[in-house]
Structures are given as C-alpha cells and as structure tokens.
Image (tube, rainbow, N blue to C red):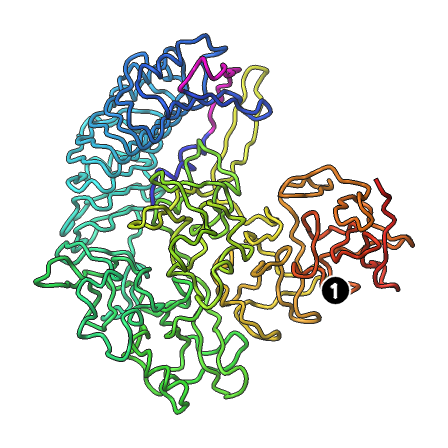
Amino acid sequence: MEPFTSLCLALAFLLPAVTGQGGCLVAREIGPCTCEGRDPKMWSHEPDLDCSKARTSEEISSAFGNSWPSTLFWEFRLRDNEDVRELPEGAFGSASFQSIRIRNTKLEAVHPAAILPSKDRLLVLDIQNSRLKEFPFEILPYLHRLLTLNLRGNSLTALPALQSISLRVISLPSNSIASVEEDGWNTPNLRVLDVAMNPSLEVSSGLLKKMERLERFWCPRCKTGPPRSTELQKFNPEIFNAVGLSADKIRRILQDAISGGVASTAYPECRLTEKGREYVGTESKTETGKKCLRWDSKPYGKPKDFSPIEDYEGHFPNRDSWSHENFCRNPSGKERPWCFVSDRKIKWEYCDIPMCDDRDPPKCKVTQQGGEYTGRKNVTLSGLPCQPWAGSAPHAQLELLLHRQAFADAEKINREHNFCRNPDGKVAPWCFNANGDDPSWEFCDIPFCDIQPSDRHQQPSEAAEHHVYPECRLSERGKEYVGTASKTETGRPCLRWDSKPYGMPWDFFHKGYPYEKHFLGASATPHGNHCRNPGLHRRRPWCFVSDPHVKWEYCDIPLCDDKSWSFLRQDFHAIFWSFSVRRLKPLECKDTESGGEYVGTLNVTLSGTPCQRWLTPKPNKHDMWNFLSQFSDELDGPHNFCRNVDEGYGPWCYTVAGVRWEYCDVPFCSVPEGKQCIRVAGKCVDPLECKKTKMGKEYTGTLNTTVSGYPCQPWMSLYPNWHEMGYRSKGHFPDELYPAHNFCRNPDSTDEGPWCYNGSGKEPKRELCDVPMC
C-alpha cells in the first residue's frame, strides 16, 4: 500500500479556497506549453498549464513572460520529458499554483525561488521518477498550505530535519536515502510518512516518537533487520493504524518492539501449515536475502521432486506458474516455501515465511480459482454433499491420482476428506456430488477474503486529481475499465486488440472459445487500442505493445475517487470547503450499450424475478462461468448480479423462475434523470420523427404507440410478449437499446415499416406504427 494515495487523510480538513479568474492565452503565445481552461461552473476555474513538450527551462519561462489575465493557475505539469534539467529562479515568473506535478523526467535541480511564488497557495508538490539528488527542503516552512510532498523515485541521499506546520503526507520511496537527521523535526500535523525502498535507510525510534499524529509509517525494503529490539517504533495508539515493513531483513520482532498499534501476521502473508503449500503471499526473497526467479522461466527445467505424471504448471495453485511471478511457493511439497535463485550451484533456497497467528483454515479464497483454499466447506452451492476425494468413487480417485500435487493440503487427504477443492483449474473450488445423481459435480459457496491491497496501483489516487468513471477504474483489477487510455505506464503506445499481435494470451481463461469472446461485449473491435484487462491473472489494465520481446505492459489507470463537496459561505468574499476521497460504490448504470462493464449489485430482472447464481447450474443448466474473461468482475459463490456475458443489449441473468433468462433494469449512466435520450454511437442525438424509406429501418423517433393506439412493449422486456428481438442475431436497431426503450422500430426489416410489440397484453402480439414519411 502506498501512503501517498492516502490523501484522504490529508485533505479531510477545512481548507480556505483560493479562487481566480485566470484564462488561457492563444496557443502560439505560450508554445510549447499548452493551457487548459476549467469549466466556470465548477468550484474552480483557474487554468492548468502543461509544459511537457518544452525542450529547455527557458522555453517554460517564456510562456510565463506573457501578459496573462491572471497569475493564478490551478496546476503546472511536466511529464515524460527528457530535455528539461532544472527549474531555475524565476522559472514561473510571478505565477502561482495549487498543484505542481512533475513526473518521468530528467529534472536534476529545483531552485527554491521557482517554488516560492506559490507559497500561499500550493497544496501538492509532486516530483516523481526524476533525477533530483537534492531538494530545497528549507522552503517548506514558507509553504503555508502544503499538504503533500511526493518525491518518489529520485536520487536523494539524505533527509534533513523537516519543518512544516501544514504537511500531512511525506512520500519519499525509491530514493537512495541513507540517513535521516533526527533532531530538529517540526511536523506536528504529519499523518503519513513513506520512506519505502531506501535499502540503506534505518529510521530511529526517537524520530517516530516525536510524530504524535502519525497514522501510517511505511518502510518496506529498508534496513530494519535482522532482530528488532524494544521500542523500535512507538506510536500514538489512539490514531495509529498501519505500519509497513515488508521485504525487510527482519528475522524476529521482539516483544514491545512496535507499540501503539496491533501487530499481527495474517493470511495470505503467512503460512497456515508447516509446509505452507497454501501460501500465496508476496515474499520474493529467500531467507538469506537472495532474489527469487520467476517460476514461469523454468530456470532449471522440471525439478526432480515434481510428480512425473503431472506437468510443470499443474504443481502450482490454479495450475499456472505465471501468476505466481517470483513469489515464494512450495509446489513440490518440500519442508516449507522456497524459490529458484540465480546461483546455479545451489539453484534454490527456502524462504522465511512466518506461521500465521490464526492457523484455522480460512473460510474464503484469495484468488478467483481458489486453488489455495484449504477450508472445510463440504457441500455445494445447491446443498449437495461432497464426495470424498480418496473414497470409493472412481471419478474422484482418478482426479486425485492425476492432480494430487494441485491440492494445497495433499498430505491431509484421506478417505474422509471431502472438502471443496480445485485441483484441475476450474473457475472456483468444487467437489463431486456424493449422491451420485445429476449434476455429477458442482461449485461450492466460497466467498473472497477481504484483503487490503498492497500494490500502489490498487490505491485511491491523489486527491488533487479528480478521476471520474469511465476514465478510471472502480476495482483493483479494473476489469470494468472502458476508458480511453492507450499508452502503457512507460509511455509505449498500445496496439489494437483485434490485431491479435501475439495470438491467444496465456491467461485467457478458456482457450477453447474464440479470441473475441474474452472481451467485454464479446468483441475486441470496440475496445480499439485502449487499455483493458480481459485476462484472468493480470493485476490491472494492460495492453499489447509492438516490442516482441516485451509483448505487453501494464497501464497506469488510477482508481476512481468520489469527492463530496459541502460549501459554507461565511460572507461574500470567502468560501470554505471540505472534502474526502473514498472509493466509489459500483455504478448502477451502463456506459456502453452492451453494458459489459457493469459491476453494480442489481440482482433482479426487468420483471422483478430474482437472478440465479452464476456458479450454479440450477435451475437453468449453463456453462457461462467458462466465459470468465468476459465478466467485468470476479466470481464467487453468492454472485448473482446482472452481467452481460455475451453479445446482448445489456446486463442480464438467468432467472430462478419463469423464463430462462431476462434483461435487467440497467439504464445508461449519462442520461439526466427524467430526460429522454436517443443514443447513436454513444451520444444522444436529435430523434428523427419521420422515415426516409418505406421500410423505415433508419427511423429513430420517439413514437411509442401502435396504429391502434396500443402502448409499445420495451424491446428488452419479455413481457407480456416473449420474443427474440433482444438477441443481436435477430434484432438490428439503428440506435442503442436500454431497458425503457419502447419506441417503434423495424429490427427485422419488415416491408411495411416500423412496428412494436403490443404492451397492453392484448391481441395482436405486434402491430405497425403510424410513422410518416419525411
């Protein structure tokens, strides 16, 4: 977890607003910089200035040398720039900002006088992944409103005593900081301190004791081992809630070494058994500190202690080695988790994975397929008893014989062991039906564990940037993302998905289905070259790239945030606001016609019929779980939410009674409540209230009654008349459908013209509409 993303802590305070009336000059006057004005209806309409295309600092200075309507700007940006090496004195003239963001550059120096014009306004100072060897920390006392200082990924070697009354978040990971000055600190409001991945750094307990309001301290991959003594770190127990020391060289933490918080070792970052075959944590170094190699690289071929009748992949939870990256595992049943190392003389070493405080098998799964699950559930989703794996049933015996290595608790399997497991890589844990009737096997009701994400890309984004769906992701993996980003996190352009540049990806779940069936909406073409996450095991949205040695890369798609504003007017001149950043709840609407991206919680159909759970074949037999790559989220036992796992016109589900399946009431997101929208190619258009041809296939008007005056039945509804126009293979509409759409159309090319189904429940079942010629 990256604390810089915890700006909700820093910004949940009442702050005075600084408003301005600044506008943008014409592009030729400020080139190579670009100016973007903000919507005057929004709470701030100060412009942003982006100088990412500048070749020198002088070019930046020249942009600010013009006669601007105002010197007040909201944000300055310099990104993906290899030419600008410094921000000298006077770089911004007299201009001031509330946010300065510099990322992925070769910037080596920042003059204090370049920042000081913003001293009364600056909230966020963000210089990431650049080449700063020094930073003018001495200016911090003068930046009266600065909340966040982020200098991630630079080359800083020392951290002096900082003084700032306003700072809430200090983020300095991935530098080369070896020393921290202990005396002289004055940061009374600091909530988050992140100095992760500074391998030579050791932070003294004396320093941390002085930070009375510190809530989160992060120092993974720091010099904090091997044993830690009493009062290594002491925090205020009333507010402190998290400490991160992962991947350090700590062997033991002595009693009272960390006080003020509650330290625990919880699964999956620990092992439940001595052998730890169920371990799926993220430790990637051996007990002597050697870096683990990737499992899928097979550096020394198939080990001798792997089963001769099982392939290499089958020894890993979920039957794949790629998703386990270079994390410690125990695929062969050694004494405890281990990994391959680059030293060819020893080839592998054990890892130091601690035992869990609570060793009872969890009642939940960590991964989608749940190959690591060792819980005691022994009935299926529909309540059928499970067949013992080593019992007398030949099909269970065969499964055990072929895939024993894939059982996370293989050593405990006996004739009574009938717990739900997933030895053959199905979608989720399952078991054979002990009753011997149909179905012969079924999935079990195993929910997901509630685990705090640890990756920086899985955290809410910085509060100064407001990310709104669909240009952000609502979940950690972002399978629902349908935004327009088309570059990777390193800046490489994405290739089109429908070009299939490298064939069928390894993690498309069911390779027996066509390539296109693994995408939201069952087609790759609409997704263009935008970042997506159609596979099963990748952590966040990604795309193919042209380099055949790399093939694909992740994209930097932020998590969505929800900024709730409350205004309090003191007088005509002052406006105060407070806001907090939190994870958005799933949107109860669709952004595209197919609604493949929908991740809401609606679980009843248009007629009010409850939805059948996706992982059970009762009452309607199906195998839609094999389209797992096409789901916008992950599946567990209780999941019965409306989704679109085919080429339909919107989210749907199998029903528990009545018709086999039915659409759900999921409207478009972008239509204001109470207003009508005729959508074509994703945009509202003016309805055409007449037909240009007799057949009228192009008609997009709003007439919704028949020639006899009967009301039209919505096209996505199966009541009162069951029909097949809701199948794309049957009905072809000139505009996009949504649940309430009941306008006259001609989806089957009837010669007489537009028509609709009779929504009154009377005869005739369908009737023409009186649409005039244009």
Instruction: Locate residue 657: give its quadrant.
Output: bottom right
Seen in the picture, residue 359 relative to 418 is either above or below; the reply is above
Residue 319, horizontal then vertical, whole percent:
34, 69
Q: Is residue 170 left or right of residue 746?
A: left
Q: Could you tell me which secondary element the residue under label 1 belongs to?
A: loop
Residue 332, horizontal then vertical, whole percent:
23, 72
Seen in the picture, residue 22 relative to 411 is either above or below; the reply is above
Q: What stretch is highlighted in magenta?
A: 14-32
Residue with the most extreme bottom position: 392
Residue 208, horizontal then vertical, whole percent:
24, 37
Residue of label 1: 723
Residue with the most extreme left position: 345
Taking the image as drawn, is residue 199 in sight?
yes
Residue 383, horizontal then vertical, whole percent:
53, 78
Residue depicted at x 43% and y 24%: 75
Is 29 magenta? The answer is: yes
Q: Is residue 444 left or right of residue 234?
A: right
Residue depicted at x 44% and y 34%: 463
Q: From the image, give the main secondary structure of the stretch colored magenta.
A: loop
Seen in the picture, residue 678 relative to 422 is either above or below; the reply is above
Seen in the picture, residue 377 relative to 554 is either above or below; the reply is below
Q: Quadrant of the C terminus?
A: top right
Residue depicted at x 19% and y 67%: 301
Instruction: Locate residue 663: give its quadrant.
Output: bottom right
In front of the other: 141 or 418 = 418
Residue depicted at x 32% and y 59%: 266
